[in-house]
Amino acid sequence: MTSSPPIRSSGLTKRFTRRTAVDGIDLTVERGEVVALLGPNGAGKSTTIDLLLGLSAPTAGTAELFGGPARAAVVAGRVGAMLQGGALLPTTTVAESVALVAAAHRHPLPVAAAMERAGVTAFAKQKVAKLSGGQLQRARFAVAIVSDPELLILDEPTAAMDVDGRRAFWTSMRELTDTGRTVVFATHYLDEADAFADRVVMMSAGRIVADGTPAEVKAVVAGRSLAFSLPDPAERFAERLRALPGVQLVEVRSTRIRVATTDSDAVLRLVLAERPDAHDIEVTARTMDDAFIALTAATAEEASR
């Protein structure tokens, strides 16, 4: 058993003819971490995963899994992957697909155990071609874990799942991570990153723009959010708020106003003084959404210069 981290990249870069998809990423993931790669579409998350798994050759830089090439770790059954483009044979059943992958590994989980953990037992005899989008994602998950991997790499794992499916998926994921496995998952669902990751690596325009716990990432955006409702359309008063020092954003939806500010006390005093008819007032800490918007917008602005 090597002491090298499950994932280590240095200067990892991927350039295409007209764009740079991944731009000099340095990333180390330690054993037992649950890491979310968070970013908008086109941020470079999927390309980064392809580079880490050895499915694409970097233009520059290096990537290692457990201190060596990705292929060696995959062949040894130490890595399980669930990719957006991962296809299962349409004419096989779910159980046959999982069994086929299990047969390629030396020490796999029992097929029934992998299917139970992935929540596919109920439709195990169903043909892959007949699966719904959410069921297909669960079947891919069963295939990813049947090798009993130490490292799981998942690209948008809950895409096409409904709310109940996402909840069930993350329940099963918690059971896996409680055993000390390392998990890296790419997502654009802010709530998933906030709720399930120990660490959030936020990407924008192929670069890492934030790396830390969910609380640390949210803390990069100073201030609070204040929201309230008025009995009449709110746009005129919104202009008054936008003129206040420290106000970063004012959103108006009919009679509801949301203000992002570094001085919520000043905003609240103004609201109470000038609009005593304001009601349903809420003052909250900044969210992952706020950090996401601020950090990715800053990177996009820099890239456009």
Image (cartoon, rainbow, N blue to C red):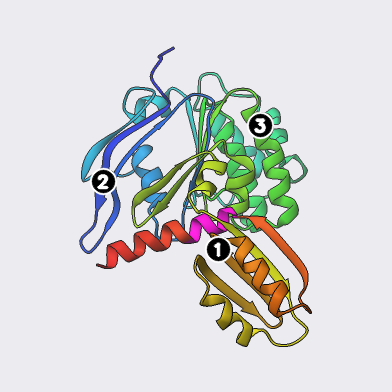
Q: Between residue 11 and residue 305, name the one nearer to us.
A: 305
- Residue under numbered circle 1: 261
User: Within the magenta stretch, is there residue 158?
Assistant: no
Query: Does any portion of residue 158 appear in the rendered image?
Result: yes
Q: Which of the 4 image quadrants contains residue 238?
A: bottom right
Q: Residue at x 33, y 42 (%)?
A: 51
> Is residue 88 in view?
no
- The mark nearer the N terminus, 3 or 1, is 3
Residues at marks 2 and 3, CA–CA distance in whole angstroms: 35 Å
The correct choice, above or below, for 305 with respect to 11 in the image is: below
**What is the x, y in percent for residue 232?**
74, 87
Q: Residue furthest top?
A: 1
Q: Of residues 166 and 116, which is closer to you in this image?
A: 166
The secondary structure that dominates the magenta segment is helix
Of callouts 2 and 1, which one flags the residue occurring earlier in the amino acid sequence?
2
Q: Around disc 3, counting alpha carbons within 10 Å, would you say few (fewer than 14), some (14 to 19), or many (20 or more)? A: many
Q: Vertically, is 38 above or below 177?
A: below
The local crowd at label 2, few if under 14, some if 14 to 19, many if 20 or more residues have their Cα within 10 Å, is many
User: Which range of residues does the magenta coloring cover?
Assistant: 286-293
Relative to 119, is 35 on the left or the right? left
What x and y, as percent, mark residue 211? 44, 41
Q: Residue at x 76, y 76 (%)?
A: 278
Element assignment for label 1: strand
Marking on residue 13: 2
Q: Amino acid at mark 1?
A: Thr
Q: Amino acid at mark 3?
A: Ala
Q: CA distance from mark 3 to mark 1?
A: 48 Å
